[in-house]
């Protein structure tokens, strides 16, 4: 379930504060973020731990990372965290315990230099870096139903790209092609009940329906590194599974067969990785998996606990994966799944849908 589904079904969110879990005979207080723990304890891998300081505001206000881990990337001899991540957050818009409207922010992958990029009384979501790092494409409902917009990397020159009209027609979940010439996205512009995958030129012209799906919905398109294929998830077989096709819509192939009433495979991300990273509920809670581009060698790299891990994306060097932890944090994990999760961004009620640029 992506951010779109979360926003539509917010009433299903689980109150985490005060939940207790039995761990090795010892009851521990469950948590999603540091807000769920009594100070000075902090949230570590789903449980309130330790005597250290809290990140209730200080870590974010000082623009420093909150690595709730005894092993950071340096001590584990992992490659350094480089590049910049853009994500959606309501840290400046939430009111009390209520969810606020999400704005877009950028932050260095080491947790420094967080910057607010948008400032509208609307939901700005699903940011995606251009290959040249100069622009960010995203979706917003600032003019009514969701449409696709683009802005410079510093948040300036915000311009609407998609031109579909009518209510409640939406364009959403944009993804830039590796050559920067096209943008894939989803839309219900030809059928206000079902979403299909479209592509348009990077200036918003020449939109084309690639999937023409009459059964279920298609979501979360992501390009292959060479730009010749697009991966996405679809409910066309009844429940969500992952498919890929040529970038002209031909040669549709199904990559996962998780789809049941309880199990779903969804939210794939491909470029710039050689493998596809995605989430599945095949082991219970939504968590992160990788697979080869033909669907083989599927393996879990994310933890399985009480909280969902959503919208994964590759780091440019393919050494890490960033993802949304529940709706409350952006976290990073080594791509082989062998290291600790590191908290990149918290605060607010929503921190979600990261995109990692060079």
Image (spheres, grey):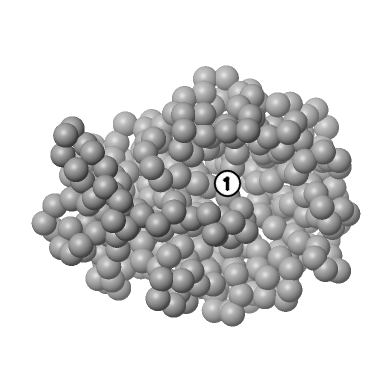
Q: Viewer-proximal residue, 53 or 181?
A: 53
Figure check: 291 above or below 76: above
Q: Viewer-proximal residue, 12 or 80?
A: 12
Relative image position of residue 226 (x, y in whole percent): 66, 37
Q: Which residue is mark 1?
A: 1
Residue 331 visible to the viewer = yes
Relative image position of residue 82 (x, y in whole percent): 38, 51
Figure check: 247 above or below 8: above
Figure check: 274 above or below 82: above
Q: Viewer-proximal residue, 202 or 167?
A: 167
Give the residue drawn at x 83%, y 32%: 250
Give the residue drawn at x 53%, y 34%: 280
Relative image position of residue 50 (x, y in whole percent): 13, 52
Give the residue drawn at x 30%, y 63%: 35
User: Element type at marker 1?
Assistant: loop
- Residue 228 lies in quadrant: top right
Q: Is residue 110 left or right of residue 213?
A: left
Give the residue drawn at x 30%, y 51%: 19
Q: Residues within 10 Å of mark 1 (few under 14, many from 20)?
A: some
Q: How many marks?
A: 1
Give the farthest residue toward the top. 296
Q: Is residue 109 left or right of residue 251?
A: left
């Amino acid at each position: 379930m992506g951010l779109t589904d979360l926003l539509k079904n917010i009433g299903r969110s689980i109150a985490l504060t005060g939940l207790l879990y039995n761990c090795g005979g010892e009851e521990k207080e469950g948590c999603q973020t540091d807000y769920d723990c009594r100070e000075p304890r902090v949230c570590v891998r789903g449980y309130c731990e330790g005597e250290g300081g809290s990140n209730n505001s200080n870590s974010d206000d000082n623009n420093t990372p909150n690595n709730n881990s005894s092993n950071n990337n340096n001590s584990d001899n992992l490659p350094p965290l480089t590049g910049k991540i853009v994500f959606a957050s309501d840290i400046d818009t939430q009111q009390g315990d209520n969810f606020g409207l999400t704005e877009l922010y950028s932050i260095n992958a080491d947790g420094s230099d967080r910057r607010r990029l948008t400032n509208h009384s609307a939901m700005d979501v699903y940011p995606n870096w251009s290959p040249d790092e100069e622009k960010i494409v995203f979706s917003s409902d600032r003019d009514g139903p969701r449409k696709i917009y683009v802005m410079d990397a510093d948040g300036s020159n915000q311009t609407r790209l998609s031109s579909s009209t009518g209510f409640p027609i939406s364009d959403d979940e944009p993804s830039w092609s590796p050559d920067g010439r096209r943008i894939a996205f989803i839309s219900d512009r030809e059928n206000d009940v079902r979403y299909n995958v479209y592509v348009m030129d990077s200036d918003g012209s020449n939109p084309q329906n690639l999937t023409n799906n009459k059964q279920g919905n298609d979501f979360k398109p992501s390009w292959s590194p060479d730009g010749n294929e697009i991966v996405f998830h679809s409910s066309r077989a009844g429940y969500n599974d992952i498919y890929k096709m040529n970038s002209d819509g031909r040669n549709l192939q199904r990559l996962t067969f998780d789809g049941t009433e309880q199990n779903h495979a969804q939210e794939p991300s491909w470029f710039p990785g050689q493998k596809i990273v995605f989430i599945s509920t095949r082991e219970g809670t939504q968590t992160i998996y990788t697979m080869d581009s033909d669907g083989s060698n599927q393996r879990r790299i994310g933890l399985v606990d009480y909280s969902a891990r959503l919208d994964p994306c590759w780091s440019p060097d393919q050494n890490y994966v960033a993802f949304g932890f529940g709706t409350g944090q952006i976290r990073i994990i080594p791509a082989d799944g062998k290291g600790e999760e590191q908290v990149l961004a918290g605060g607010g009620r929503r921190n979600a849908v990261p995109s990692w640029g060079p």
